[in-house]
Amino acid sequence: MFILANFLTAVATILNTLLTIYMYIIIARAVISWVNADPYNPIVNFLYKATEPVLYRVRRVLPDMGGIDLSPLLVLLAIFFLQKFAVSSIYDLAFRLKMGMGAGGITP
């Protein structure tokens, strides 16, 4: 079971790292949107291409807020939720498997 536990720990660590990187990309995109950045700049272009698919889906669901874009805030909240719920749950499951308690918490 320790192999599965180590695998789950690695998956949780990678997922947490990817979510953190994407969180910083979302924050950079929000900061770039406050200034008049050159859209042909490769960094700005990357930020738009990396975030627009997710932000567009969130914007479609949100009502019109009169020029205020809350989609980055909602995506950041979703990332925080995934880090606290999904990643923590995977870590806890891996710990239980490593300690021999199984998924249900009952020792065999």
Image (cartoon, rainbow, N blue to C red):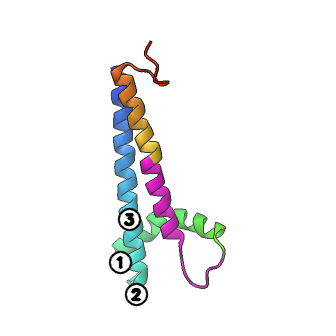
Question: Where the C terminus falls, by quadrant?
Answer: top left
Q: Which mark is residue 41?
A: 1
How much space separates mark 2 and mark 3, taking CA atoms? Answer: 18 Å
Residue type beneath disc 1: Asn
**Relative to 71, does residue 7 appear above or below in the rendering?**
above
SS type, badge 2: loop
Viewed as shown, does residue 6 lie left or right of 48? left
Per the image, label 1 sits on a secondary structure element best described as: loop
Q: In which quadrant of the rendered view does residue 21 lie?
A: bottom left
Q: Is mark 2 in CB contact (under 8 Å) with mark 3?
A: no
Q: Is residue 108 positioned above or below 19 on the image?
A: above
Q: Residues within 10 Å of mark 3 (few under 14, many from 20)?
A: some
Name the residue: 61% across, 80% down. Answer: 65
From where the camera sits, is residue 46 visible? Answer: no
Amino acid, disc 3: Ile
Q: As shown in the figure, which amino acid type bears the numbered disc 2?
A: Asn
The label nearer to you, 1 versus 2, is: 2
Camera-side residue of 38 and 58? 58
**How far from the left and from the top, in percent, is residue 27?**
39, 69
Range shown magenta:
64-84
Q: Quadrant of residue 94?
A: top left
Is residue 81 within the magenta segment? yes
Outermost residue toward the top?
108
For the residues marked 1 and 2, what is the alpha-carbon distance in whole angstroms? 12 Å
| N-terminal label among 1 and 2 | 2
Q: Which residue is mark 2?
A: 36
Q: Earlier in the sequence, mark 3 or mark 1?
A: 3
Looking at the image, residue 72 sits to the left or right of residue 41; the answer is: right
